[in-house]
């Protein structure tokens, strides 16, 4: 198992979390398996950006993003150089620090941000 630190997120994980992530599974699946209900509107098919995360530590240990993911990330709210779609980022054996952005593009469109 790989240690994944999830930074605090106001709604999904207010106190942050330290989870044991399973290598070979996506960040998204590991979050969901550990009770962190990250949004994944396209059912993890790499067709939206709602599962966007920023990998603060361990970014280079993840599989390389494919072109389709890169194209979608351009539309993500709060895009940073270490941004990934969590449904496409596969956990390796290196520890990770992951930040879930405060908003998703869906929330911004629905006027849920404050």
Image (cartoon, rainbow, N blue to C red):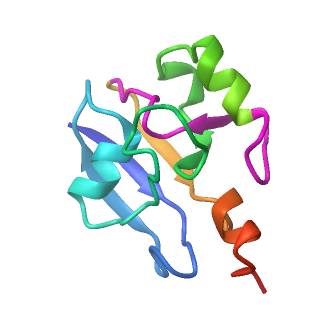
Which segment did they paint magenta? 74-92
Most foreground residue, 51 or 110: 110
Q: In the shown orientation, is residue 58 left or right of residue 82?
A: left
- Does residue 77 belong to the magenta stretch? yes
- Residue drawn at (73%, 46%), measured in percent from left and top? 76
At x 58% / y 18%, what residue is drawn? Answer: 65
> Quadrant location of the C terminus?
bottom right
Whether 88 is drawn above or below 102: the answer is: above
Residue drawn at 46 percent across, 71 percent down: 16
Residue 102 appears left or right of 29: right
Q: Residue 57 placed where, x, y %?
A: 58, 39
Q: Looking at the rendering, which quadrant does residue 81 occupy?
A: top right
Q: Measuring 48% from the left and 21% from the top, which residue is drawn there?
A: 61
Residue 74 image-quadrant placement: top right
Main SS, magenta region, reads loop
Residue 80 % position (x, y): 79, 41
Is residue 54 part of the magenta span, yes or no? no
> Looking at the picture, does residue 55 appear above or below residue 5?
above
User: In this rendering, would 19 be left or right of 14?
Assistant: left
- In the image, 28 versus 16, the foreground residue is 28
- In the picture, the quarter occupied by the N terminus is top left
Picture coordinates of residue 20 (x, y %)? 24, 48
């Amino acid at each position: 198992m790989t240690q994944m630190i999830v930074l605090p997120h106001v709604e999904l994980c207010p106190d942050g979390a330290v989870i044991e992530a399973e290598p070979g599974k996506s960040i998204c699946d590991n979050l969901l398996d550990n009770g962190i209900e990250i949004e994944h509107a396209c059912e993890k098919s790499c067709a939206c950006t709602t599962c966007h995360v920023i990998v603060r530590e361990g970014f280079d240990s993840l599989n390389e993003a494919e072109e389709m993911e890169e194209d979608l990330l351009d539309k993500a709210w709060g895009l940073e150089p270490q941004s990934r779609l969590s449904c496409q980022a596969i956990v390796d054996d290196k520890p990770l620090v992951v930040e879930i952005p405060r908003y998703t593009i869906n929330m911004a469109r629905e006027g849920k941000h404050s």
